[in-house]
Image (tube, grey):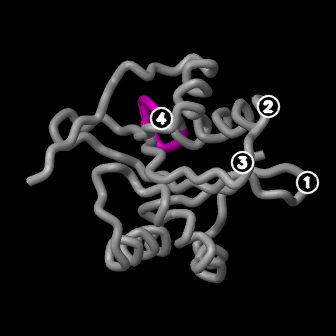
Amino acid sequence: MLRQILPDLVVKHWDEMKSAFRIALPPNVKVDEEKLTNVLEAIINGEMQVWGCGKDEELFSVLATAIAVDQFSGERNLLIYIMYGYKLMTQDLWQDGLATLRDFAKAKGCTYIIGYTCVPRILEVVKELGGDTSNVLVRLEV
């Protein structure tokens, strides 16, 4: 079951979460302490949400989301900014988590749930859940 983790609990457990977030930041972010502090500030300020997915008091994954507004079209999407898995999740947990995120996204006026990944298992799951994995993020060093 996917549940939102309130900011005060994130702060309390920040050392453990920071380790997971450090590994799972998007590919367009060069990781350093300042960027992780920015993430924490966004969580505390309510700009980002943190979610935990688990079953019977066992945590399987943690993720951070934010409402991403396209600067040109104004379209709102729920961005899965960070996702870190501690254990393999069952299809039931994936489906339940997606339903929770969909409800949250609809309530926030979003059109899509979007995210970045290069993890083959995540791509498989997205396809199994009816998602589109045809887009590719490209990056070049400056």
Magenta residue check for 53: no
Instruction: Name the foreground residue: 58 vs 114.
Output: 58
Q: Earlier in the sequence, mark 4 or mark 1?
A: 1
In the rendered image, the quadrant that contains the C terminus is bottom left
Q: Which residue is mark 2?
A: 92
- Specify the segment rendered in magenta: 107-114
Residue 109 is left or right of residue 72, and the answer is right
Q: Identify the residue at image location x=63%, y=68%.
A: 6
Residue 134 is left or right of residue 90, and the answer is left
Q: Earlier in the sequence, mark 4 or mark 3?
A: 3
| Foreground label between 1 and 3 | 1
Q: Amino acid at mark 1?
A: Asp
In the displayed structure, 10 sits above or below 76; it is: below
Distance from disc 1 to disc 2, alpha carbons, whole Å, reads 14 Å
Q: Earlier in the sequence, mark 1 or mark 3?
A: 3
Q: Residues within 10 Å of mark 3 (few under 14, many from 20)?
A: many
